[in-house]
Amino acid sequence: MQKKLTTVGNSLALIFDKPLRRMLGLGPSRMVKLKTDGRRLVIEPVEERDVLPYAIALEARSVLRRLMEVYGMGENCFRALAPEFKRTLAYDGWLEFQLEDANASQRATVIRMHECLAALERGAEWPDAIAEALRQSPVPGAPPPRPTAVAEGCSGGGEQAG
């Protein structure tokens, strides 16, 4: 199939006719993923379950900063929430450059950070906030958290953040 690009303001648009939209399940607010090898462009629909809620994605870096700067999150607390990332700096860089390509485990980590911050803002202590975040958005393949295990080595404030 060949399509002609259309000018929309200062941008170019590709118009999908109704039969193509129906076949691919595309609608006005449907997210698509674009891939290119430098020569070809591949457009594929993104499953709703594979997309972080926009507000959560938009605030992810500020949530990390608040956890570190306001609540003193150190590496032990961070690792309890984000076991797939080795350090907060790696997670921060990933948020900046690769968040849109997040897999299910990484999306769960972003949600855990939000849940933990919400619990801390309600007055919870670090171990309870982490346990609540892990209950709300479990680490895929991990057993449910034990509050005593979460408390070991994670007290917030006194840890070295980094």
Image: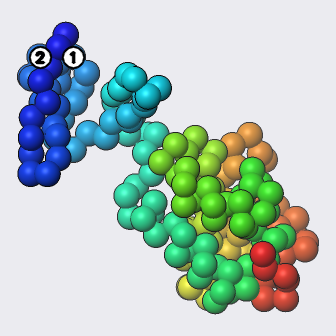
Q: Position of residue 113 (x, y in %)?
A: 61, 66
Instruction: Give amino acid for label 2.
Output: Pro
Quadrant of image for the C terminus: bottom right
Q: Which numbered marker is on residue 19?
A: 2
Q: Which residue is drawn at 19% across and 10% down?
A: 1
Q: Which residue is drawn at 52% across and 43% down?
A: 101
**10 Å crowding of disc 2: few (<14), some (14-19), many (20+):** few
Q: Which is more toward the observer, 158 or 99?
A: 99
Answer few, some or many: residues within 10 Å of disc 1's Cα (few below 14, many 20 plus, some between 14 and 19). Answer: few
Residue nearest the viewer, comparing 33 with 144: 33
Q: Which mark is residue 23?
A: 1
The reply to whether discs 1 and 2 touch (Cβ–Cβ < 8 Å) is yes
Question: In this image, 91 relative to 41: left or right?
Answer: right
Q: Residue 115 sits in which quadrant? A: bottom right
Give the amino acid type for the residue marked by disc 1 in the picture.
Met
Instruction: Pick whichever, 87 or 82, lies toward us.
Output: 87
Q: Is residue 71 above or below residue 48?
A: below
